[in-house]
Amino acid sequence: MPEGTVHEAEVHAVLSARSKPRSNGTIKKKVVGLSAALVIALVLPQVVTNTYWLGLLNFLIIYSILCLSLNLILGFTGLLSLGHAAFYGIGAYTTAILMTRYHVGFLPAMLASAMLALVFSLFLGIPASKVRGDYFTLLTIAFGEIFRLIAQAWIGFTGGAMGIVGIPIPKVFGMPIRTETQFYYLGLILLAITFVCLTIIVQSRIGRALIAIREDELAAKSMGINTPWYIIMAFTIGSFFAAVAGSFLAVYQTTVTPSNFRLEESCLMIIMVIVGGMGNLWAPLAGVLIMTLATEMFRSLAEYRMLIIGGIMMLVLLFRPQGIFGSSAFKD
Amino acid sequence: MLYEVLMIGVMVGAIYTLITIGYSMVYGVLKLMNFAHGDVYIFGTLMTYTLLAKNQWHPALAILLAAVAGGLLAALVEIVAYRRLRAAQHRMISMITALGAAYVIQNLSELRWGNQVLPFPSLFPSKQLMVMGHAVSLTHLVTLVIAVGVIAVFNIFLKRHKMGKAILCVSEDISTSSLMGIPINRTMSTVYFLGGVLGVIGGVLYSSSYGAVSLGMGFRGTVIAFTAAVIGGIGSLGGAMIGGMILGISENIISVYVSSTFRDPITFLILIAILLIKPTGIMGKVEQGKV
């Protein structure tokens, strides 16, 4: 760890306004809530047998992984990344190419995808961590555009606008995943792994350092937090899990096309996180649920889609910046 | 061949400079990435298109009306989406509301004009002039002259006019300016208004020299303006000019000698390279933060 001079107490001092003492009661409540959620998630496909709803559930899982990982960057570190869809896309394309052309198994392909996203995010994160927050956003937009153009123009490698089709059925430890329900459980495992990893990160000193950076980067820096290091860390971890989601999308859809990974997709993820509540571990999941259901319900209003998305973005942030389920808005 | 490419590059650069100045000025005052800039100027350009092609207005009148409309729209965005958030919230939050405003404007323009490419009428007669033994299209030359003229007038406005000076003060330090009696809200609205006006003029010149306008150019415009502003050094007029010129010229060279597919990726690579070498941009000053 290069930030040997950090004093835990000082980081806490930055956050003293936010940190709440934990009593036994809240921990008990959390355990009960978590087990209830787990039980519901496990029995859900036994109750919901309609393929349409199961498909919707699988997309809920994909967006949940994406939004949880985006929340680490957006909600906890306070960096607006508009390139999350590109890392999602890197994951999907890498898995698709490895599985269709090189006949790699699903799990190794997924791991390779996530590692590749990690490498790319490192390349982007190094310049991005040196510059101010807004330049970070510009760099992520630039990266997203470069990714999209390569996916569209390098036809020999990425299949161009048609994308890659016929991704084989994934096998997990020898078990083929075919039905919607099987995909649901696979996705649920991936989501659980993501959630646990991100929770551990957020509740450790890393998480506290990230929040300190979000609240006041300069103050965090002057307290000895190696801010570029933590910004890169948050960005690469977030991108890693975005690629996991992309990998799952590739095998679930059996096709990937560049249109899955446009800038609009990044914006949609941002809205989901905002509506739920930034900087809160659970809230993005609520945002995903609300926004996915809303998109399904208002499918007939496709013409006004962006108007609605943009309107929600503005209304939520103007009148309830902490999101629907977030507890406290973060301030500059 | 190279001469022509460079000539068009300089013209496009001048137009980009116009669009970038509006953007960079807003950034200088509010330190906020204005996502709505591109969609505002494309709204103004589309409006000019309707007035010119459908209603047969006189070009000067049409551009004037559209520029004012674009400026008012930009000022409206400032009042609705940013003013409430200016003091209290994390900067990122106003960036997201800006993105929301951009989406709303984009969708409204799409409902009115659709997102196909529309043929934009040429504002100037298509003639070739001979300058120093090379053929130069009149459109390109006039566009360049107008763009440079507008930039010059704007520069004089900033340095001489009371409001221009107020804008420079506010971009230096909001709270001190407020204590000195500068009306902050009015200055902000003026900055947005002028940014919108300059953007629409740039958008109209761009569309008329390429003979086309489409909604998709809006978001690209935002990104190009920000890229140019960052490359040149944000908040500085000279920087906007250098950034705009670099992008305009490099873009045309890449389109002609490499491929137009790689135009934007290479532009972004230039951006990443410059941020790595000099994070403040070519003309930018290092800013000292305060705890």
Image (cartoon, coloured by chain):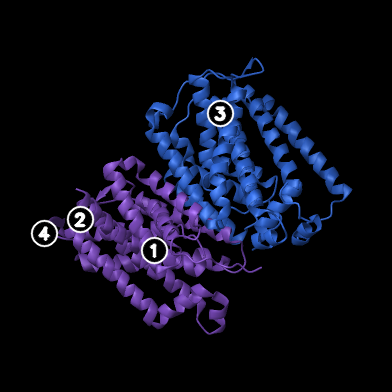
- Chain coloured purple in the rendered structure: B
In this rendering, would B7 be left or right of A265? left
Which quarter of the image is occupied by the C terminus of chain B?
A: bottom right
> Within 10 angstroms of label 2, few (less than 14), some, or many (20 or more) residues?
some
* Residue projecting furthest to the bottom: B181
Q: Are marks 4 and 1 in contact (CB under 8 Å)?
A: no
| Numbered disc 4: secondary structure | strand
Query: Mark 4 or 1 closer to N-term?
Result: 4
Dividing the picture into quadrants, the one containing residue A164 is: top left
What's under tag 4, amino acid-wise? Met
Q: Chain of mark 4?
A: B
What's under tag 3, amino acid-wise? Tyr
Q: Chain of mark 1?
A: B
Height in image: A210 above or below A87? Answer: below
**Do badges 4 and 3 share one subunit?**
no
> Within 10 angstroms of label 3, few (less than 14), some, or many (20 or more) residues?
few
Separation of marks 4 and 3 at Cα, in angstroms: 67 Å
Please name which of the two marks, 4 or 2, marks the residue nearer to the observer: 4
**Do badges 3 and 2 share one subunit?**
no
- Identify the residue position indicated by label 4 in the image: B130
Residue A136, horizontal then vertical, whole percent: 53, 52
**Do badges 2 and 1 share one subunit?**
yes
| Numbered disc 2: secondary structure | loop
- Identify the residue position indicated by label 3 in the image: A52
In this rendering, would B218 be left or right of B280? left
Q: Nearer the viewer, residue A47 or B87?
A: B87
- Identify the residue position indicated by label 2 in the image: B121
- Identify the residue position indicated by label 1 in the image: B240
Residue B100, horizontal then vertical, whole percent: 50, 55
Separation of marks 2 and 1 at Cα, in angstroms: 28 Å
